[in-house]
Image (spheres, rainbow, N blue to C red):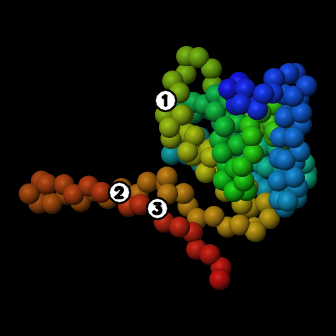
Amino acid sequence: MRSGFDIFKTSISKSLIQQYNQSSKKLLEEIISQMPLGESQIKEKLDDGETVQLRIENNGSQLTFDFQGTTNSKKYFLTESAVLGCCLAALKCFTNSSFPINAGSLECLKVNTPTNSWLSSRYPSPSFLGMSEGTRLLSELSLTALSKLGRQKDLAQSSMSLCLVDIEFQSGAHFYDTTPGGVGARNG
């Protein structure tokens, strides 16, 4: 970061960083203000019986991702910062916009995770499956909930939802393949 400022002969100061954060906040507020107002809710049961529950609310300048009602898990464990990353990824994908992620833009997002859930895991919980399968699941769920805000964008199932084909022949040989995801249907 410092080398970019050196090119323009600008020094980094507390004031400059504050201006950058304020500009970032205004940019994300503008993006959020163009989204439909209101709230959407989504609830999904996982394979092992765990529940993920999400309520998204847009008040015009701030988005709230509220995961209250999400249960604990025996399989997935995520940290609160990973949950925030999933919400940011879903927002960037949904709005198809580019905005810096810093203290300013983070003021526009509020993420609530229940203390005793797989979304606020602590050591010694193993986070490997959470960081691979769990983040995909949570990002997709967040993106789906965002699309339900105003129904202006209907999204197709993520291609990350892998469909596997395994055919066993009489000889004992196997044919194993994955089917790739497609693109969602569009009106017109």
Horizontal arrangement in the rendering, residue 96 relative to residue 60 (left or right): left
The answer for how far apart the CA atoms under marks 2 and 1 are is 22 Å
First in residue order: circle 3 vs circle 1: 1
Which secondary structure, mark 1?
helix
Q: Nearer the viewer, residue 149 or 101?
A: 101
Residue bearing mark 2: 178
Q: Can you say whether 148 is above or below 111 in the image? A: below
Decide if residue 94 is in sight here. no
The answer for how far apart the CA atoms under marks 3 and 1 are is 24 Å
First in residue order: circle 2 vs circle 1: 1
Which x, y percent locates residue 45? 59, 48
Closer to viewer: mark 3 or mark 1: 3
Which residue lies at the image location 87% right of the left edge and 21% below the top edge? 14
Q: Amino acid at mark 2?
A: Thr
Residue bearing mark 3: 181
Which residue lies at the image location 81% right of the left edge and 23% below the top edge? 11
Q: Amino acid at mark 1?
A: Phe
Horizontal arrangement in the rendering, residue 170 relative to residue 82 (left or right): left
Which secondary structure, mark 3?
loop
Q: For the view shown, which residue lies furthest in the left direction?
A: 171
Decide if residue 183 is in sight here. yes
Residue bearing mark 1: 128
Q: Can you say whether 183 is above or below 51 in the image? A: below
